[in-house]
Amino acid sequence: MQRILLAVSGMNPQITTETLYCLHSEGCDVSAIHITTTRQGKALLQSGLLDSGKG
């Protein structure tokens, strides 16, 4: 079964990583992540989670 995380994120993209960590700790694998955010939130998500090479 495919599990998709649907998240709403503003200026705190770490909420998404904390949610993923919690789900992983409970043995729930996530197949995809869909995030709804603002333009500023998108910039933070891209720089902090995707472009940094940390995620």
Image: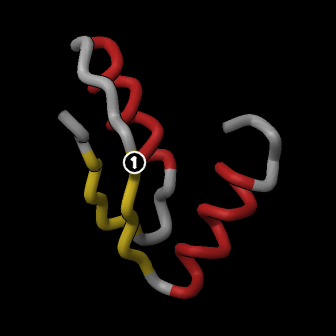
- Quarter assignment of residue 3: top left
Q: Position of residue 31 (x, y in %)?
A: 37, 39
Q: Horizontal placement of 12 versus 55: left or right?
A: left
Q: Residue at x 24, y 40 (%)?
A: 2
Q: Which residue lies most toward the bottom here?
A: 39
Position of 28 relative to 5 (above/below): above
Residue 9 vs residue 4, the one in the foreground: 4
Q: How is the image coloured?
A: secondary structure
Residue position for label 1? 32
Horizontal side of 29 relative to 43 (left or right) equals left
Query: Local crowd at mark 1 within 10 Å, few (<14), some, or many (≥20)?
Result: few
Percent of width and height locating residue 43: 66, 74
Q: 51 left or right of 21?
A: right
Q: Quadrant of the C terminus?
A: top right
Taking the view exactly as shown, the residue that stands out farthest to the front is 1
Q: Residue at x 32, y 25 (%)?
A: 29
The residue lying at 40 percent from left, 25 percent from top is 21
Q: Quadrant of the N terminus?
A: top left
SS of the residue at dot 1? strand
What residue type is disc 1 on? Ala
Residue 5 position in % (x across, y down) = 28, 49
The residue drawn where x is 34% and y is 19% is 24
